[in-house]
């Protein structure tokens, strides 16, 4: 059975005070699903220490929102996979649509990052998804399959199936528009079919304006194994409700 995962991407939000408040809320959640949070880099040690000092009895993990594809060297402003591991990260998001659209990350660069993350024993969360234009042109499944294929070509199918995939339609991220449960399930099923038998164990998350009000229907779909939550993960109460529904 696939253990549901609810991941909170805090993006570039927060300060020490709000992070402390969010952590306090997180430690209260208590749910069956695994919970993971993705703070901005500078707050990772604070979150890790707070979780480490607590006595929570449910799974709560920490990850980074991005990482360098390089091991070390003259890459000003970058953070390596080894550094993330040093600070206790179990996950790293790779290929978030904001990285692809704002910073021009290509499928090949995302594949390189994915390989680097896995090589240090961190689990990548590979984000894939189509723009509205691509959906309107009927290209959703082709675009998503190509994003995954680029990573399979680099690391092999087995490694991709060990990771987590997040289907995040670009038009649904931060817009308040959610894919319907049927639309999301159709893409999740196509991803699972692309992965074949090995993909039965792969957790495929849905992301795009997930809230407590729409999470239950999404989580009822057979191929949706949790969520990658942006905006709603900044509200401990709302995030907690989503986690409990997974
Ligand atoms: C995200 O950042 O991955 C995301 C899904 O954001 P939101 O939930 O705000 O749409």
Image (cartoon, rainbow, N blue to C red):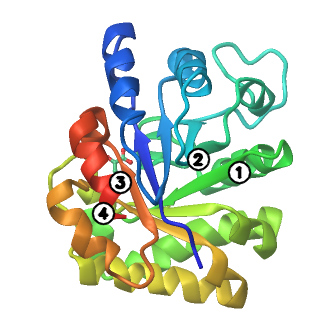
What residue is at 49 percent from the left and 71 percent from the top? 144
Q: Where does residue 99 sit, x and y in percent of width and height?
A: 48, 40
What residue is at 39 percent from the left and 9 percent from the top? 16
Disc 3 C-beta below 8 A from ligand 1: no
Gap between marks 4 and 2 measured at Cα: 25 Å
Q: Is mark 4 on a helix, strand or loop?
A: helix
Of circles 4 and 2, the one toward us is 4
The image shows residue 189, relative to residue 228, as above or below, that is below
Q: Where does residue 194 sit, x and y in percent of width and height?
A: 61, 85
- Ranked by sequence position, the earlier of labels 3 and 1 is 1
What residue is at 70 percent from the left and 54 percent from the top? 111
Residue 12 visible to the viewer: no
Q: Quadrant of residue 157?
A: bottom right
Disc 1 C-beta below 8 A from ligand 1: no
Q: Which mark is residue 114?
A: 1
**Residue under circle 4?**
245
Gap between marks 3 and 2 measured at Cα: 22 Å
Q: In terms of depth relative to the viewer, which is nearer, 17 or 139?
A: 17
Of circles 1 and 4, the one toward us is 4
**Residue under circle 3?**
243
Are dots 3 and 4 in contact, CB under 8 Å?
yes
Are dots 1 and 2 in contact, CB under 8 Å?
yes
- Which class describes the residues within 10 Å of circle 3: few (<14), some (14-19), or many (20+)? many
- Which class describes the residues within 10 Å of circle 4: few (<14), some (14-19), or many (20+)? some
- Which class describes the residues within 10 Å of circle 2: few (<14), some (14-19), or many (20+)? many
The image shows residue 69, relative to residue 189, as above or below, that is above
- Ranked by sequence position, the earlier of labels 4 and 2 is 2
């Amino acid at each position: 059975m696939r253990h549901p995962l609810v991941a909170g991407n805090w993006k570039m939000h927060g300060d020490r005070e709000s992070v402390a408040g969010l952590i306090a809320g997180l430690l209260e959640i208590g749910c069956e699903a695994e919970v993971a949070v993705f703070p901005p880099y500078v707050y990772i040690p604070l979150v890790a220490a707070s979780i480490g000092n607590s006595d929570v009895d449910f799974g709560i993990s920490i990850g980074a929102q991005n990482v360098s594809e390089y091991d070390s060297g003259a890459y000003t402003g970058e953070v390596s996979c080894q550094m993330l591991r040093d600070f206790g990260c179990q996950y790293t998001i790779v290929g978030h649509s904001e990285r692809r659209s704002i910073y021009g990350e290509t499928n090949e660069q995302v594949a390189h990052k994915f390989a680097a993350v896995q090589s240090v024993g961190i689990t990548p969360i590979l984000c894939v998804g189509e723009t509205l234009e691509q959906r309107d042109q009927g290209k959703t499944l082709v675009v998503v399959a190509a994003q995954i294929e680029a990573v399979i070509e680099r690391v092999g199918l087995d490694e991709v199936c060990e990771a987590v995939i997040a289907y995040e339609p670009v038009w649904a991220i931060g817009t308040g528009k959610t894919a319907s449960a049927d639309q999301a399930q159709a893409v999740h099923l196509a991803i699972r079919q692309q992965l074949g038998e090995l993909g039965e164990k792969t957790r495929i998350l849905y992301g795009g304006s997930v809230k407590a009000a729409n999470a239950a229907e999404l989580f009822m779909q057979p191929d949706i194994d949790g969520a990658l939550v942006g905006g709603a993960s900044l509200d401990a109460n709302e995030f907690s409700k989503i986690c409990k529904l997974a």
